[in-house]
């Protein structure tokens, strides 16, 4: 039995190595995030692409098992300033048309919402999210996100839920926190991928936002990280397994 289990695990590893997740980044990270670490443990090949550094977006072929478009400091409302974001939006469109699993996080989610015709912009009262906030899951999101999940956010802009999309979760500051469009696209306003080193980086770079309406102090963020980030990372790993249909017989 042990030999059979070992053979199954080796087969799963070989199958996973034949697949590839394309991850689009928009700034330099302090270290690989929780998602990249989880994909590495699963034996999934990851292709990091950084259009903000002039890197070209790849072709979508049969090896591509999914795409993640991550967050960043750019704004969807400044597409003229960041023309490569237009290329990323076109890439997202091609991904959706091929029904390849597509996950957008923060800026990535906002680009997907914009492409689907929804408004993206600053909070009407000037609020900024920087800290951990509770999510309230809708009926449509009950099988995806645990209700009350405390999630890290770091955003000044948010999105309306696009038409023909299902709202999955809401929040107290930016009301639309997650949506699903079609069979293979999910957008998250919050950040389940952040490690302690990345949060440290955020606190250095985004520290000027602390004190604005809606933000939490560094002490509040640090305490919330200790309380909630482990569960958030565990949920994210499980979500990636299911969303990208990975073989979970591998030991994480």
Image: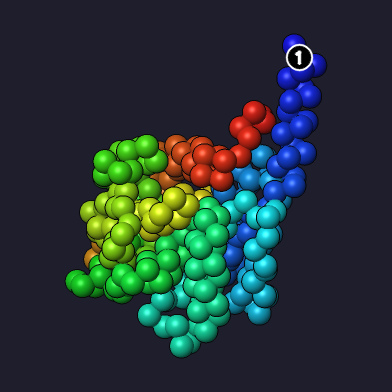
Q: Is residue 179 left or right of residue 20?
A: left
Which residue is drawn at the image coordinates 73% and 40% (left, top)?
15
Q: Is residue 99 above or below residue 111?
A: above
| Apparent side of residue 38 relative to residue 221 in the rendered image (left or right) | right
**Quadrant holding the C terminus:** top right
Nearer to me, 149 or 20: 20
Give the residue displayed 63% in from the left and 59% down from the top.
22
At x 35% / y 54%, what residue is drawn?
A: 179
The answer to whether any part of residue 230 appears in the image is: no
Q: Residue furthest front?
A: 98
Q: Position of residue 211 (x, y in %)?
A: 29, 66
Q: Secondary structure at mark 1?
A: helix
Residue 4: x and y in percent read: 77, 17
Residue lying at 42% horizontally and 66% vertically, measured from the top left: 112
Q: Residues within 10 Å of mark 1 (few under 14, many from 20)?
A: few
The relative height of residue 221 versus residue 29 in the rendered view (above or below) is: above
Q: Residue furthest left?
A: 125
Image vertical order of residue 128 relative to residue 34, above or below: below
Where on the picture, by quarter, is residue 43?
A: top right
Q: Position of residue 133 (x, y in %)?
A: 31, 50
| Residue 160 visible in the current orientation | yes
* Residue placed under numbered mark 1 in the picture: 2
Residue 9: horizontal and vertical position, in percent?
A: 73, 28
Question: Please, which colouring scheme is shown?
Answer: rainbow
Quadrant where the image shows the N terminus: top right
For this orientation, the residue located farthest to the bottom is 80
Q: How many marks?
A: 1
State whether residue 220 is above or below residue 234.
Answer: below
Answer with left or right where residue 172 lies relative to residue 208. Answer: left
């Amino acid at each position: 039995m042990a030999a059979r289990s070992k053979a199954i695990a080796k087969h799963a590893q070989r199958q996973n190595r034949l697949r590839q997740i394309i991850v689009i980044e928009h700034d330099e990270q302090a270290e690989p995030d929780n998602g990249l670490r989880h994909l590495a443990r699963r034996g999934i090949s990851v292709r990091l692409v950084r259009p903000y550094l002039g890197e070209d977006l790849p072709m979508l072929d049969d090896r591509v098992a999914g795409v993640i478009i991550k967050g960043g400091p750019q704004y969807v409302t400044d597409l003229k300033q960041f023309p490569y974001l237009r290329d990323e939006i076109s890439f997202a469109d091609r991904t959706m048309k091929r029904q390849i699993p597509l996950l957008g996080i923060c800026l990535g989610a906002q680009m997907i919402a914009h492409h689907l015709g929804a408004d993206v912009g600053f909070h009407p009262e000037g609020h900024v999210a920087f800290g951990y906030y509770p999510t309230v899951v809708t009926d449509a999101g009950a099988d995806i996100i645990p209700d009350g999940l405390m999630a890290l956010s770091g955003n000044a802009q948010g999105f309306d839920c696009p038409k023909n999309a299902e709202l999955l979760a809401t929040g107290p500051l930016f009301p639309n926190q997650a949506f699903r469009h079609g069979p293979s696209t999910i957008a998250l306003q919050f950040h389940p991928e952040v490690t302690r080193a990345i949060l440290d980086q955020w606190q250095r770079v985004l520290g000027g936002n602390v004190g604005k309406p809606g933000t939490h102090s560094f002490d509040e963020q640090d305490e919330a990280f200790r309380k909630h980030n482990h569960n958030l990372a565990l949920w994210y790993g499980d979500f990636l397994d299911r969303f990208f249909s990975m073989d979970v017989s591998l030991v994480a």
